[in-house]
Amino acid sequence: MRTVWAMIAALAAVAAVPAAEPDAAKVEFFEKKVRPILTAHCNGCHSADTKLAGGLRVDDHKGLLTGGNTGPAVVPDKPGEGTLLRRITQKDEKRRMPLEGEKLTDAQVETLSAWIKDGAVWPAVGVPASFGKTKPEYEELKKTHWAFQPIKGSRDPKGSAEQNPIDDFVRTKLTAVGLKPAPVADKLTLIRRLTFDLTGLPPTPVEIDTCLADDSSDALEKLVDRLLASPRFGEHWGRHWLDVARYGESTGPSRNIPYPFAWKYRDYVIDSFNADVPFDRFIREQIAGDLLDAKDKAERDHLAAATGFVALGVKDVNQRFKVRFQMDNVDEQIDVVTRSVLGLTASCARCHDHKFDPIPTKDYYALAGIFTSTDNASGLRNQMGGAGLAYYDPANLIATATAADLPAVPPEQLDKLKAEVAEVKKAWDAIRGTPEGLKPAANGQPTQRPFRLKYEAKQAELNALTDPAARGFAVHGVRDSKTIGDTELRVRGEAEKLGPVVPRGFLTAFAVKDSRPVNAKESGRRELADWLTSPHNPLAARVFVNRAWAKLFGRGIVSTVDNFGVTGDTPTHPELLDHLAGRFVADGWSVKKLVRTLVLTRTYRQSAEATAEAKKLDPENKLLWRHAPRRLTAEEFRDAALLAAGELDVTRPKGWAAPPLQMVEMRDNGPEAKQVHELADKSKARSVFLPLLRGVTPHALEAFDPVDQTLVSGRRDTTSVPGQALFVLNSPFVRRQALTLAERVLKAEKADADRIATVYRVALGRTPTEQEVERAKQFVAEYESAAKDEPPPPEPPKAVKPKAKPKKADDPNQDPDTIDQTGEEVDAVVVRAKDPRTAAWMALTQAVLGSGEFRFVR
Amino acid sequence: MFPISRRDALKSASAGFGLVALAGLLGRQSAAADKPLAPKAPPLKARAKRLLFVHMNGAMSHHDTFDYKPQLAKDDGKAGPGGGVLTASKFKWSQHGDTGSWFSELLPNLAKHADKLTWLRGLHTDTPAHPQAVVQLHTGSANAALTRPSLGAWLLYGLGSENQDLPGYITANPPPNFGGAVNYGSAFLPAHFQGTRIDDRGHLPNLKTTSGTALQRKQLDLIQAMNRDLAATGSAPDQLEGVIQSYELGFKMQSKVADLLDISGEPQAVKDSYGVTDKPNAAFARQCLMARRLTEAGVRFVEICQPGWDHHNNLHKGLLDRCGSIDQPVAALLTDLDQRGLLKDTLVLFGSEFGRQPTSQGKDGRDHNITGYPMFLTGAGVKPGVTYGATDEYGQKAVEGRMHTNDLHATLLHILGLDHEKLTYNYAGRDFRLTDVKGEVATAVLS
């Protein structure tokens, strides 16, 4: 890491060019006279090290200019206008600042007044000298890095023996090292592989039989077309995109606030894959759906839901500083957009020029301006502390167009209620935070408490009447802000350290022919979306075809699927990648066509058969000498187990899977999470429809490397750890499916051999061999007799919990820091067979569900 | 093995950046290999083999417990620097041990360990709010836009697990909010490095067989027979061997981990020394006893947690209550670890995400303070009885031996034999560290 230190040192050495040189004498006056007053008397409650009383900070220029909850503290040149002078000179001692401590002297007040009158000058922030300058190493990379060069069309390889150009590209590389592709896999294997890869589910015995019975030469094509047309396709491929979109139904770290309408984005994604919405359009809708034309209200709402992509990120709502909250969210948005679509880590350029890729800080802030001109309408506001609905801001949601159809509230009723709210708010504001208000009342609680309760109850009443979200007519999404404009460079990424204004625009690492500059009257998301998905953008098509390839072949042509930058891997088959990208664009960005083409190649259809020679020459199978077996994802394992047990319900659940939760902080192992777990445990819907709050992974998905919902993740881990074994052996989920399947075959079939055959067919998609049938019979017999002799271990004792009932988390009056901290576990459910015979069959079915053959697709 | 550091990679890749990517890939692959948790030799001299963090969540008031300031007592009632009214502790203070360390009367048992403790008194952090500060204490960064791996995950990544039959990272009763699962998560590190959460009764999901061990063995034999059938085919997945092993390991863990977490068999005298009972108010005592057992069994990183220190009001009674629940068990834990020789290779860290103000908040409270607060270390790798760093005359701001959370992490890693600048993981094209681009080892406290 010395290199990094050296870079930082080098950066620091040249970093002293101020944004705009303020008058030196005025700065000196500030430093000598003004700053000491602020530091000694105000910083204790109003600085970066504090909780920021009233939302005001005085240790930062912008903090003073923007002010706190009651408006600007300082208006340059106008001592009469800001709150600073007013509050320090207030007659009422209870309101006069500093609240605790000595009153400022007349001389000190005079100094502050003079400073404000004289422009309230503050020392400028040094901007790195490299800002806005051409960097030779960047220019070199723009010319040389493969991913920034234009896509080289859909050229077909020459002199090919294969019918399909894709197979040709693969074959050529194999031949060059003396390897041969594996033989084509048998039809049964292909049926299972295709069904899992296209729908995330195993084929049912009926589906298998139908396809096997079809002798026609295009039987597989028919299967592929059927699978592509199935709604299950969008559920599975939509899930792939949700990984990339870091989809989560709550804010995540810090205070975890649910997003009750996130599911509308999830459904949008699934529907888009099912409808084969062209991928470029799909991206445009997610980034700028609100700006696109809609033919009716339904489409308007559909497009609004699409923008959840940008809004549903991880958020730190407990952030004290509004500007930091905004810039952190902008950063998160830049990260998700650039990594998902371009495979570039533009957010690395927030604090300094990108260390590897030619992305200067200037480009980052060109993008940032687009997002600072955009409302992140997730329904939240930042606030330091606060419980209940404190972070919920209904105005900061996107009300759906269909909400307009709601019956209007009679104006007189509304006016009356508004007046009542204003009245109780006035009372609350008057007492809030004053020594009087903080004084304990007879019941030991602060005197101000009832005032707050009254106000919040009234406000809630008003919300219920006026807030369409309360009735479900809302989405988390984005819209253009009221104020549109470019934003400033933030020195070292610090939100408050403003450098020069950077005009909005896009990355300059590569040129995109025919792209339009940002429309000054809009946020610029429309043009950003167009720039991203232009056929001339060298990355969007490459990145997506590579994602699809990785899902189908186990490894991307570029193995670092989320990183096409300089530190990413280089393509194993660059010409193939360009061929696919070119063809994808030429085919109208059709994902279904792309998938169809890929799975009908010989390369996809080859068997997983390995040879010692090939394993030695290319152990990672980079050259694709066989089909790479892959482990089921957490979702596939759960869905396949439910399906084998005959329990999977493929209908799409209506609405959100965790309806009782509001936009109120939840505790990751507290009562709210328990509620979510119980809902998830009960659900028989496909895994993509489970409640997916960040930090609260459903139990049934926990074992097999679930996706990290906080980060763009184009690739799942596939570890083999003991926790998975314990999950298979002991989890209520697996045991329940095993028991259900055992009971089913015991009831449905008469002969043991038939029972065993059914288990193999529903779980593994094949009939067992004779030896397997014998082994299973013997196992069941032995197990049954042993089970008669061995009584099952006693049920675990239920946890003893303290009697005291924790306060409800949505009590708006509760200090969040005093919320009950006791974890609440979901009581362990014991799944047991009713008799030794069922237990024996259950042990068999569970073993099959736990076998490597069930857990992997070949 | 360690991924190639960026420096090495850059050195050998003067023609391009290809190797930086390679380093990331190697890191990924070695992690995903068959035995990702196998113990790894630490690259530096390891002063301790494992870490036990006794987490006082909510910010314990150091003014009323550990950080004695005569000047604060003298200036009680005067205006404090930066505002507020200075408020001395209402509790009595006395000196203990040969070091003459000051403790308030709230912690009489812990005070008996005075000479064994190594104080870090100049700590400071970035955000005076629990959610961010707790997350920063555990992951090094409070930036919500990029969730980082937790300290324990980094330790497992760097050192593996000492005991293959046990989880290498166990966290008991972690705060459900304040970052929740992030505090023991693995973020972009592979998922098997994340912490295993247990409650104060040692409950771990899926740990216990419901069918009986002998029957389950029979079932497992069938699973393994099926797995071997598959392994014998030419189209077996490469990972199958790992799956087969994971079954054997998981099977063994059931009895071992369950036994380990079951404190009911401890001698009554031991239980009494910790104050362990079955009652809810002994939740933390039970955690302490479990912590000793887990440490003894070689769990690389154990964290136990006592919440409820956030005394904005009710400071007096609150401290009496909280200190009452931790004083005896923590003291007993240290004694027990010492008597069993475990302090020779275990490092213990004790403390909160930040401290509190010397000024009062309301009638009977103190507000958050991120500018100066103490934590203590004891056991392997540190000099007993040494104090490093100090706060000002009021215990408000760290003025000597200042240590940011990054410095604390650098020091912890160093004691465990890891160079915080070289323990990197390549994610999204960048080498990440627990300490980001900062961190200095407090060499003054090293043994």
Image (cartoon, rainbow, N blue to C red):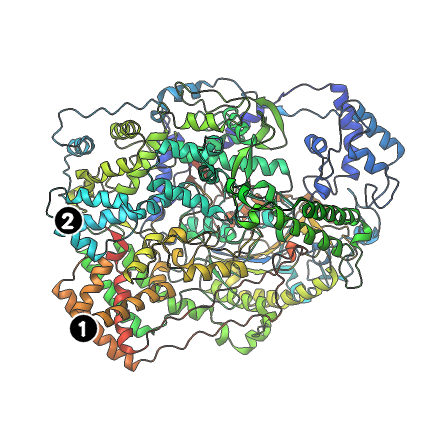
The amino acid sitting under disc 1 is Lys
Q: Give the chain of mark 2.
A: A
Discs 2/1, front: 1
Where is mark 2, residue-wise?
A: A187
Q: Decide if residue A395 is in sight here.
A: yes
Q: Are the residues flagged by discs 2 and 1 in contact, CB closer than 8 Å? A: no
Q: Residues within 10 Å of mark 1 (few under 14, many from 20)?
A: few
Question: B1 or A56, which is in the foreground?
Answer: A56
| Nearer to me, A355 or A747 | A747
| Residue A675 % position (x, y) | 50, 61
* B262 versus A722 height, above or below: below
> Is B258 situated left or right of B76 in this image?
left
Q: Secondary structure at mark 1?
A: loop
Q: Is residue A560 above or below residue A186?
A: above
Judging depth in this view, the residue of A839 and B316 nearest the camera is A839
Give the secondary structure at mark 2. Answer: helix
Residue under mark 1: which chain is it in?
Answer: A
**Which of the numbered marks, if any, corresponds to residue A49?**
none
Location of residue A595 (image quadrant): top left
Give the image location of residue A178, x and y in percent.
Answer: 14, 35
In the image, residue A129 sits, relative to residue A64, either above or below, namely above
Which one is earlier in the sequence, the residue at label 2 or at label 1?
2
Q: Residue at x 44, y 18 (%)?
A: A136
Left of A257 or right of it: where is A778? left
Q: Which residue is mark 1?
A: A750
